Structure formats: C-alpha cells, structure tokens
Image: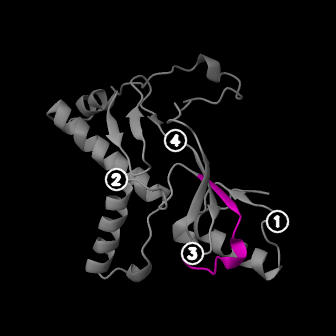
Amino acid sequence: MVSTINGDSNVPFYKELANQGLDATDVPVVAFSVGEEELRGIDTKPLVGHLAAWNYFQSVENPVNEAFVSKWKAYAKAQNLPGADKAVTNDPMEATYVGIHMWAQAVEKAGSTEVDKVRDALAGQTFEAPSGYTLTMDEKNHHLHKPVMIGEVQEDGQFSVVWETESPVRAQPWSPYIPGNDKKPDYAVKSN
C-alpha cells in the first residue's frame, strides 16, 4: 500500500494497522510523509518492516549527522522542549537546516541580503548535509539536488536505510506527464 497520509494523521493510521493485526508481511506500507517525529508517539514494534521514502533519516551514520543530531538533542533538552528526552530529527528538519545554511552562504557570497543578489548567489551553492551527501543548488532552476532513501521502520522508532541513490538526484522542475510543461523553462525566473 502507498500512503500519502501527512503529519500527525499518520499516528492513528499506524495505530489502527496494529490494532487490526496487520503487519508489514500482510500489507506492506510505503509512506511518503511519515518520519521519526510521527513514530516517536506510538509503539513501533507492530510497525517493523513498513517503509518510508525520504531524503534523510536520523539513523544515517556519518560525522555531519552525528553532530546535527547531538546538537538538536542538546538544544531540546536545554530549552526544556516538550518530549526533549525523546527528541528526534527528521527529513523536514534536515531540509530546513540545509536551506538556512545555503541561504547564509549565498548572503556571504552576495555581500548582501537583497533578494535578487542572494538568488543569483544561490546558483551552484553546495552544502555537506546531515544526509551524508554534498547537496547542490541547481545553477539554472534553483531546485536542490538531493538523495532518495527508503527506510524500514525499526522497533526503536528509527529507520534502517534499505536502499538509497548513489548520489543526489537532479530535480525535474516540471512534471513531464502534464501537457504543456515541456514548454516551461528549466531556469529560475527573476522577479521584477
């Protein structure tokens, strides 16, 4: 089953799968919007084996991610955030972290926070991401080249990466399956 359920709505969905006694060997689920944050609120033992597709999982092993996770957990604890004792990172957090850092790099390169100058400076920016990949901002269309990972739910609420691309994938700015998209430009349109 493919699940496009988003955010907190995942919790009752997965709880009901477990209540019905359906596990990944009966009805395997691959989700496009369930991550560590949603899973930390439920018993994941009955969910072992279900899959999720993301660009990042907290469980990836590399020094950049270890520092990212450690800093987040320390911050959550220091700020006494709700659930700080079980703080997790997830794909949206990593994406925000990357975006902020790439924006800061572009501001430094542009020597300004002026929108058009920063936009121009973003082209071709790279960043060593917690995912373990060097991400690149496309020089033409400003879409970020990112990896694709498939993670399998583990008993501890984390994901074991069972498949990933060898390198970041260049994003297609327009779907080739929608008529007329072939006439849209493959570059960022400047504001006036």
Depth check, front residue: 191 or 135: 135
What x and y, as percent, mark residue 86?
44, 79
| First-in-chain label (1 vs 4) | 1
The answer to whether residue 9 is above or below residue 81 is: above
Marks 2 and 4 sit apart, C-alpha to C-alpha, by 16 Å
Please tell me whether mark 3 sits on a helix, a strand or a loop. loop
**Mark 3 vs 4: CB contact within 8 A:** no
Which residue in the structure is indicated by mark 1? Answer: 25
* Quadrant placement of the N terminus: bottom right
Magenta span of residues: 40-53
Left or right of 45? Residue 16 is right
Please tell me whether mark 1 sits on a helix, a strand or a loop. loop
Q: Amino acid at mark 2?
A: Val
Depth check, front residue: 171 or 157: 157
Q: Amino acid at mark 1?
A: Thr
In front: mark 1 or mark 4? 1
Depth check, front residue: 4 or 124: 124
Please tell me whether mark 2 sits on a helix, a strand or a loop. helix
Q: Amino acid at mark 4?
A: Pro
Residue that lies at the very extreme toward the left in this rendered image: 111
**Mark 1 vs 4: CB contact within 8 A:** no
Which residue in the structure is indicated by mark 3? Answer: 156
Q: Residues within 10 Å of mark 1 (few under 14, many from 20)?
A: few
**Mark 1 vs 3: CB contact within 8 A:** no
Which residue in the structure is indicated by mark 4? Answer: 147
Which residue in the structure is indicated by mark 2? Answer: 64
Marks 2 and 3 sit apart, C-alpha to C-alpha, by 22 Å
Q: Amino acid at mark 3?
A: Asp
What x and y, as percent, mark residue 3?
72, 58
